[in-house]
């Protein structure tokens, strides 16, 4: 089975590198972006090449092109994959808005490695009906 591909979008470089390390250590293919604009370009390129992104993990509060703007753009092109939002600045109203925009899971910072991996595995297991990496 091919490695599942996760796109991480996070402007805080330390957090980005930690997430990347955790996921790569658990045998996921990882691509990173520091804002929504770069992430959207990656998504468009992967689609043109016929390559699949299996899961998106994105922060919401980012300069230049936020996670919300990214979700809006993804929705406009009709691309579908599970989306996990990570943020330290959320509330119930934001959670509802994000759900409407396609967010499948909302995780507040700080979160544990186990919470992250359980969420990732849960979505990929659902997507591939049991064909998922072990944590």
Image: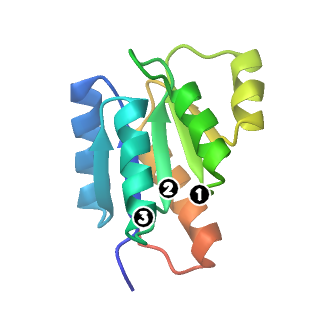
Does dot 1 land on a helix, a strand or a loop? loop
- In percent of width and height, residue 66 lies at 48, 22
Q: Which of marks 3 and 2 is in front?
A: 3
Specify the color scheme: rainbow
Please give left or right for residue 27 compared with residue 9 in the image: left
Q: Which of 6 and 40 is in front in this view?
A: 40
Residue in view at x 63 percent, y 57 percent: 80
Q: Distance between the residues labelled 1 and 3?
A: 16 Å
Can residue 135 be spotted in the picture? no
- Read off the residue under disc 3: 48
- In percent of width and height, residue 42 lies at 36, 49
- If you read the primary sequence from the N terminus, does the residue marked by circle 3 or circle 2 appear first? 3
Does dot 2 land on a helix, a strand or a loop? strand
Label 2 near label 1: C-beta < 8 Å? yes
Q: Nearer the viewer, residue 110 or 126?
A: 126
Does dot 3 land on a helix, a strand or a loop? helix
- Read off the residue under disc 2: 55
- If you read the primary sequence from the N terminus, does the residue marked by circle 1 or circle 3 appear first? 3
Residue in view at x 55 percent, y 43 percent: 84
- In percent of width and height, residue 14 lies at 22, 27
Residue in view at x 66 percent, y 53 percent: 78
Q: How crowded is mark 3: few (under 14 residues within 10 Å), some or many (20 or more)?
A: few
């Amino acid at each position: 089975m091919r490695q599942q591909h996760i796109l991480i979008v996070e402007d805080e470089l330390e957090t980005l590198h930690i997430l990347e390390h955790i996921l790569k250590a658990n045998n996921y293919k990882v691509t990173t972006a520091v804002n929504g604009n770069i992430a959207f370009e990656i998504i468009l390129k992967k689609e043109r090449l016929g390559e699949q992104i299996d899961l998106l993990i994105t922060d919401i509060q980012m300069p230049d092109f936020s996670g919300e703007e990214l979700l809006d753009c993804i929705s406009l092109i009709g691309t579908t994959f599970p989306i996990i939002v990570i943020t330290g600045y959320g509330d119930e109203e934001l959670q509802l808005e994000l759900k409407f925009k396609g967010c499948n899971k909302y995780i507040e910072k700080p979160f544990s490695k186990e919470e992250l991996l359980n969420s990732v595995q849960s979505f990929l297991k659902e997507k591939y009906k049991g064909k998922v990496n072990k944590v």
